[in-house]
Amino acid sequence: MTSVVAVGAVTVGINLTSSRAELRELGLTPGSYTEPSVDRMEELRLALENSRGTLPDPRSGGSVGNSADLIARAGISCGFMGVGGNDTFGRAFVANCKRASLAFLSELENGAVTGYDFYLHDEEGVRTIVLTQGANALLRPAHIYIGAVQGAELLLLDGAALSFGPESEAAMAYGAQAAEAAGVPFVLTLASTRIVDGYRDFYTIFAPKAQMVSGNLEQTAVLVNLAPAASLDEVRIELAKTQIDAIVTLDAGGAFARFGDEAFLMPTQEIEPVDTTGAGDAFLGAFIVARKKGLPVRQALAVGNVISGEVIQYESARLPLSVDVPGLMRKAVRFAATLDD
């Protein structure tokens, strides 16, 4: 059995440089984020292939998938559940999991299209994101492998999965309930402010039951019924009125955590980023690894800061396979140990 089981998106990403003229020819608005249908996404892919030839190899993505990748590469037994198609992208996702020692606990679906996205960087460094959920929209309770959940030490649930398809919320609830019944703690991510607000009933039920929720300041603000622009002080006050334990990433400000009656604020060194994609995912994965190694919350926050600071130095939501993640974790743990607890 795996120590940590994650449920999230089976998604691969393709990073490309582009010009604003090309983006407009493709019908895309520079700097936008769009989720077209699978058919429209396939049209875009074919257009890009016709103009460029073979596209770069896809990289696995997805928020909790990024966290699970880091957990597995850090040496913690980790498995991943999600819905992908038995196609080129789905097989690439599974291969990427294997390279990271991340167990893929699901079966790829014949005839389904794996979710994928394009990250298009223009000449001014502006990023345009185009994403299709593909087979992720098929997520339903039957895709949750209960035996793996019951045998795990921790379940990690991607809040973004709530919006995948018509049965995805039921699947997430099923996983959380199975973990609760088996005495397995679970972590719930907050995803976008739109999802937190749109699935408020789900978060109202399950956020207080989670070992912790994890998100950025805007997402946490919406969770506690504040405006997205609320300050950390305002969020802290409202969190203290709830039964919710949380870690809150603050970009260059570091991270904040609230567990029970204790609150922790861990600043970080400001780093000029190459690409901030995946910073929060890496932070969560590193925090979980640090806690499983027995570090107290404050030191685990420091470890999360170090690892997320490393991720943003690469054009990817994940550390390249050439990076020695166990060595990087040891370095982060040694740094955290120098801090007063």
Image (cartoon, rainbow, N blue to C red):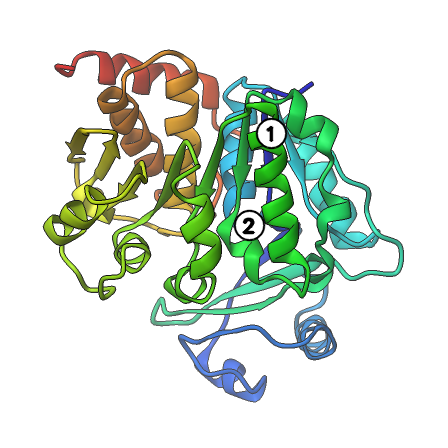
Residue at far right of view = 110
Residue type marked 2: Gly
* Residue at figure coordinates x 74%, y 35% from the top left: 145
Is residue 205 something that shows in the picture?
Answer: yes
Which image quadrant for residue 239? top left
Which image quadrant for residue 229? bottom left
Q: Secondary structure at mark 2?
A: loop
Query: Tag 1 or tag 2, which sits nearer the N-term?
Result: 2
Q: Secondary structure at mark 1?
A: helix
Question: Which x, y percent locates residue 91?
Answer: 78, 45
Q: Is residue 246 above or below residue 43?
A: above
As measured in the structure, the alpha-carbon distance from the residue carrying label 2 to the one carrying label 1 is 27 Å
Is residue 320 something that shows in the picture?
Answer: no
Instruction: Name the residue tied to disc 1.
Output: 181
As drawn, is 91 to the left or to the right of 56? right
* Residue at figure coordinates x 69%, y 18% from the top left: 1
Return the mark for residue 62: 2
Question: Which x, y percent locates residue 327?
Answer: 42, 16
* Residue at figure coordinates x 65%, y 36% from the top left: 80
* CB-based contact (under 8 Å), mark 2 and mark 1: no
Q: Is residue 83 above or below residue 25?
A: above
Question: Which x, y percent locates residue 128?
Answer: 46, 71
Residue type marked 1: Ala
Q: Nearer the viewer, residue 49 or 67?
A: 67
Question: Which x, y percent locates residue 222?
Answer: 30, 60
Q: Is residue 317 above or below residue 293?
A: below
* Residue at figure coordinates x 32%, y 14% from the top left: 295
